[in-house]
Image (spheres, grey):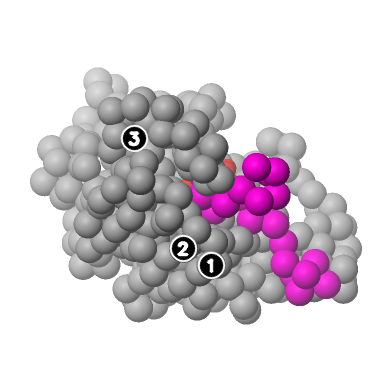
Amino acid sequence: MSPARLIDLRSDTVTAPTEAMRAAMARAEVGDDVYGEDPTVRALEERVAELLGHEAALFAPTGSMANVLAVRTVVGVGQEVLCESSAHIARAELGAHAAYTGLTMRTWTHPRGQVDLPAIQGLFAPDMGPFFVPTAAVAVECTHNFAGGAVLPIDDLRALRAWADEVGVAVHLDGARLWNAHVATGTPLDAYGAVADVLAVCLSKGLGAPVGSLVVGSAAAIEESRVWRKRMGGGMRQVGVLAAAGLHALDHHVERLADDHAHARLLAEACGIDPAGVDTNIVVVPHDDAPGVVARAREAGVLISAVGPRTLRLVTHLGVDRHAVDRAVAALAPLLG
Ligand SMILES: *Cc1c(COP(=O)(O)O)cnc(C)c1O
């Protein structure tokens, strides 16, 4: 089967910009963003800050860089951030937070990546002088990638926020797919914004932009992140062409995420998974021979990924319409159903 005919469910990062998005990119007004002179980047930063109810935002090339920049505004050298053990910041950023910021992490474990407040309270270390690593922040991920796109309920996030205020630690929200949580639950984006001191959000996942993420927070945090972004080599120039893709995605690709969620539930059913456990656009399927199923699915015309020796992952996105989902269901059901 030719690659073009393959249905790609490996990730929502595989989307290519639509014709309309490419047209918006071609029209973008640009300037040198290191001088703060790219009007399209500024418009995107202002829009995202406002959507999340924060003072400011900063365009970054990747979600990983946005997470590093965000976390380092609230955690210093020799301090720790607490997170869930399969969090993207712990598992999938190649130790960037340790390498660049010099922080350490301790983790709690939850099969759905949820906030476990008693566990977090048990891990929390106040500043006790030069003896123990002090906890500076708690990081949460919504939706939670490796927990299968699980949504963190807003009430749990509010309880975390209230406790964090009591003990004086910051909250970072890795919102690479916060848009999916917003659409799945109807929780306003600024309600998620209100539980966090800093956030990272991605345009390059389900929103379908080719590149781009943002750090969101206070004016001071963003000013500091702007310096560190440049220091890390992430000062970009006429990057309004990419910001235009992000603005287009915010206009046209947020509400449609509901389709991806419906498609994910159809795929779950075909794979023998209870669709009620699929919150958003990611389906996790346990299987004794994950690499073998990946190979057989490919022969049947569907690309899926193994995220562990016994874990398959299927992700829906705007490049996979209902017709393609029906074809994928027909191909995967005999392998997994
Ligand atoms: C994809 C992702 C990121 C950032 O990934 P990049 O590939 O660096 O853009 C961060 N957090 C989560 C939860 C993700 O899924």
The x and y percentages for residue 88 are 43, 40
- What residue did someone put label 2 on? 326
Q: Residue at x 46, y 63 (%)?
A: 326
Q: Which quadrant of the figure has residue 45?
A: bottom right
147 shown above or below 135: below
Does residue 5 appear anywhere in the picture? yes
Which residues lie in the magenta part?
A: 1-23
What is the C-alpha distance between the residues marked 2 and 1? 5 Å
Callout 2 touching callout 1 (CB < 8 Å) = yes
At numbered mark 3, what does the secondary structure look like: helix, strand or loop?
Answer: strand
Which residue lies at the image location 72% right of the left edge and 67% below the top edge? 18
Answer whether residue 191 is visible to the viewer in this image.
no
- Which amino acid does the dot numbered 1 rest on? His
Q: Label 1 near label 3: C-beta < 8 Å? A: no
Q: Is residue 19 magenta?
A: yes
Q: Position of residue 322 (x, y in %)?
A: 50, 69
Where is residue 181? Give x, y as percent: 38, 66
The stretch drawn in magenta includes residue 29: no
Where disc 2 sits, the SS reads helix
Q: Which label sits on residue 123? A: none
Query: Disc 1 designates what residue?
Result: 323
* Residue 129 location (% of width, % of height): 26, 27
Kind of residue at badge 2: Asp
Sequence-earlier tag: 3 or 1: 3
Whether the residues at callouts 3 and 2 have beta carbons within 8 Å, the answer is no
- First along the sequence among labels 3 and 2: 3
* Residue shown at 38% from the left, 57% from the top: 267
In this view, the residue in front, 329 or 93, is: 329
